[in-house]
Amino acid sequence: MYTGPTTSMTRRATGRMIYLRAALVNLRSRRSARGGDRSTMSFGHGSRGGRNRIVYSLVAGLLVGGFLQMQPLSADSAPPLLSRVQFGSFVDGAPWDRNAVPALERELGSELEALSWFLPWGEVWPDDNVSYYGASKQILLALDMKGTRFSQFGAHKYDQYLEQCLQAALSYGHDIYIRPWPEMNGDWASYQPTPDGSKANGGTPEQFIDAWQYLVTYFRSRGATNVKWVFSVDASGGDPTTATPVGSIWPGAEYVDVLGIDGYNWGQDDDWGTWRSFTEIFESMYEVLTSLHKTAPVWITEFGSKEPQVDDNSPVDSSHDKGEWFDDAFSLRTFPRLTALIYFHAKKERDWRLDSSPAVLASVRRHLAERLTGQSTPYVTPTTSAQNVTPTTSAQNVTPTTSAQNVTATTSAQNVTATTSAQNVTPTTSAQNVTPTTSAQIFTPASWAQRHRTGRRLVFPL
């Protein structure tokens, strides 16, 4: 399944490669807009070619030397969203069920680049699960802060536990991303900062800021700079009259490494609101956070969409389509500072899963495959409901039979002709049949890059 251990250096190089790719796409598009012919863009053809050779060589040299800085992409120059971010997920059952992640990756035909899960306060991290998955994936841990109060951090009540985590982090050595107090602005959180400090595991906004700064300083001052701190809020916070304004609990840019946002499309019902697009969910909070920190990357630390073809605690909604929702989200050219998408793959308050229907799975597979080929295929709205999907011919079985179906890093976009690729998986294919049977079909990072919500939701899975 995995292509071998990936060091932090390799992961950083992968991120630089994504931004380099974006820069080159932007350069080519500008040349094309000026009407330059193809010959003037190749190396060594005329004076323009010479200049291009110098520019390309300079960019490559900066990348190899490690000095290429990730610059925000403007909305008109950014490539499609999924092509420029890491894609990861919370996977129901993981990390304790070691089969859960490989099973999802086989369904997706792609290896997850990041993995997220939840830990209760008092459990030492990084642990064996982090070491197991961290060899090939970026790890994001959400800490359930129940049992704590903000004021007790500065009083050194938790120092013994923090010291255990510190030593484990120093021994681990690789970067690990931690989001304490996730969705702390939400009015459902027991650790929500409030003016009267009345929440059971909370306190006032001022006490929250002190606690956050104490926690970050404890690790950084003792050398654990590989622990990266994610300030992760909910996209809406729930009721505007009771949600905590994010600006009132902002600990300062120097204490935050990554900006995180959780948000969900809950669908249409009386309690949770309306069907909402990715942009409608995240745009407002994205603007708030990026105004507080001018340079930090933004991660979507949790997101998901209802399955409208079934009643999943929200009524059937035949006017919307989850595959189309993904198509719109993954194709966005906005949110220039987004660098990671972490999906919530579970059937919980809604059927959030990436395989909630065969058509949805086909849409996600197609977009993940497009990251390798660079080809874009429009989403086709299915005409058959998920309940009526019954495979009747062997042609529907996505099982490779020839080596031509194995897409490798050296395969050009023109040569990707497998008849069972994600683009050709139609909505009439059952979920059971959209499962590659060989690891060769897995599109790994190495092969392509080395190449509000509104309302309450339980934060931690039951």
Image (cartoon, grey):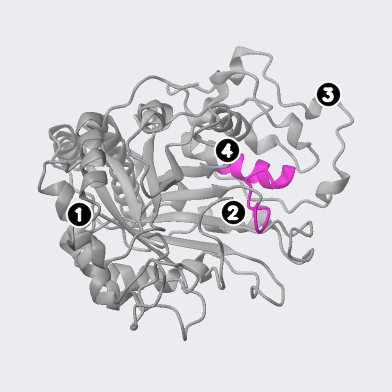
Marking on residue 326:
2
Which residue is nearer to you in this view: 43 or 278?
278
Up-down: is 268 above or below 411?
below
Q: Which residue is mark 1?
A: 216
In this orientation, does residue 40 appear? no
Q: Is residue 103 visible?
A: yes
User: Which callout, 1 or 2, points at the residue further toward the start of the chain?
Assistant: 1
Magenta highlight on residue 356: yes
Residue name at image x 18 percent, y 62 percent = 154
Cα–Cα span, label 4 and label 3 = 31 Å
On screen, residue 345 versus residue 258, left or right, reads: right
Q: Residues within 10 Å of mark 3 (few under 14, many from 20)?
A: few
Q: Secondary structure at mark 2?
A: helix
Mark 4, secondary structure of its residue: loop
Local secondary structure at mark 1: helix
Q: Which residues are magenta?
A: 348-367
**Amino acid under disc 4:** Gly
Residue 433 on image: x %, y %: 75, 30
Q: Which residue in the protein does label 4 denote?
A: 93
- 343 shown above or below 49: below
At 51% across and 32% down in the image, what residue appears?
A: 96
According to the picture, the residue beneath numbered tag 3 turns out to be: 394
Q: Is residue 151 above or below residue 221?
A: below
- How far apart marks 2 and 3 lie (CA) works out to 28 Å
Mark 4 or mark 1, which has the lower sequence index?
4
Q: Which amino acid type is marked by label 1?
A: Val
Q: CA distance from mark 1 to mark 3?
A: 56 Å
State the residue at coordinates (43%, 24%): 409
Q: Position of residue 336 (x, y in %)?
A: 35, 59
